[in-house]
Image (tube, rainbow, N blue to C red):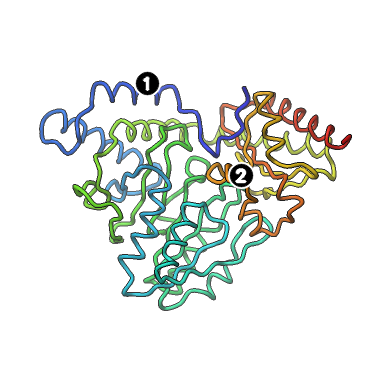
Amino acid sequence: MIYFDNSATTKPYKEVVELVARLMSEEFGNSSSLHALGIRAERILENTRRTLAETIKAQPEEIVFTSGGTESINMALKGTAEAFKRTGKHIISSPVEHDAAQESLNALSAIGYEVEYLSVDEFGRISLDELKAKIRDDTILVNIMAVNNELGTIEPVVEASHIIKSRNKKTLFHVDAVQAYGKIPINVRELEADYISFSSHKIHGPKGVGMLFMRKGARLHPIISGGGHERNLRSGTVNVPGIAGFGLAASMKFERMEQDSKTCGKIRELLMERLTASLGPMLRVNSPEDGVDNILNISLKGVQSETVLHFLEMKEIYVSSGSACHSRKNTVSRVLKAIGLSPEWAKGAIRLSFSGDNTEHEAIICSEAISEIMGTVQKM
């Protein structure tokens, strides 16, 4: 099996699986309980909070645990909008955000918030000049992802942060770092964002676990009511085993990040070289050269992406037609629409995404399989 869909999810590290299983069996106490089991669970929770905070140069008290990237994003956008609705209702975002952000913004727009979108270039990169021009006195929030999940484009979020704070110090900034975490360095002191969303299962951790960085002094309105867990910001019994697995996965991933990046870069380059040589004008590369090493989005001319996916699956090669969250909807990606990709190219787009566990030999096999199906298309 060749798994080139690591942006959808990653295979958990063996050590992570073993840790989660052990804690579920042995340390099953509720971290809010006052007895010994609960106190041990709380200790595991807080040790993990410190571990994860260190990976982004944050303070432990700035980390709020959630059920994943989607909840973190919803919490940041909806919670901030509710908390600052008396200050203003103007929000700025980009048209290439993940569905978790886009649908949250749609929901806010439906109840009276004004959501304004920046234009993007052919790789989905925002215009900083346009951002500067659009910030107003009543702009309460700007939302920009750090790395695009479909194209691998690295957005200029540090520069954006500086522009936002220079234009309006009251404007809050949320960064979706789900695809960036463990791929590129993130230092919250340099980024100066108010909220940053993260997910565990994108870095070989368990599913159903995430975190929201919330800058000290920032505030938001909780979107989940209950027992007041996580400093009254996110109610619900805390998933201690999953969070501990997230912490271990982060520790392991950050030790391997540089080597993983080199491995993924070689695979990405090899695939582009071989596919360009074999397909020529039937191939279009949608990802920028300076994007993250682990994502390669390409378009194949004259073929539907679903056809390619099923053909590759028969050879036990797994890729994606884009974001896993919308690939089952059988619609052209709005990200590809936003970058101006023609329908002819958009319908044949596939995303290959890699991890440090992949090999160059797998890239050769995959490129040969794609060339094979395109050869069949040419004959037809």
Viewer-nearest of discs 1 and 2: 2
Instruction: Name, please, the residue furthest toward the bottom.
Output: 137
Q: Position of residue 333 (x, y in %)?
A: 62, 51
Instruction: Name, please, the residue furthest toward the right.
Output: 379
Q: Amino acid at mark 2?
A: Gly
Is the residue marked by circle 1 packed among few (<14), some (14-19), or many (20+) residues within 10 Å?
Answer: few
**Residue 277 occupies which quadrant of the picture?**
top right
Q: What element does badge 2 sit on?
A: loop
Residue at point 46% right, 28% down? Answer: 12
Q: Which mark is residue 18?
A: 1
Note whether residue 263 is visible: no
Q: Position of residue 14 (x, y in %)?
A: 44, 22
Give the quarter of the figure containing the N terminus. Answer: top right
Give the CA separation, mark 1 to mark 2: 31 Å
**Residue 223 occupies which quadrant of the picture?**
bottom left
Q: Considering only order in the chain, which callout, 2 or 1, is on the residue closer to the N terminus?
A: 1
Q: Which mark is residue 279?
A: none
163 or 317: nearer the viewer: 317
Say whether marks 1 and 2 touch (CB < 8 Å).
Answer: no
In the image, taking residue 28 as reference, residue 352 lies left or right, namely right
The residue that disc 2 covers is: 322
104 or 172: nearer the viewer: 104
Q: Position of residue 21 (x, y in %)?
A: 33, 22
Is the residue marked by circle 2 packed among few (<14), some (14-19), or many (20+) residues within 10 Å?
Answer: many
In the image, taking residue 134 as reference, residue 4 lies left or right, namely right
154 or 32: nearer the viewer: 32
**Residue 267 occupies which quadrant of the picture?**
top right
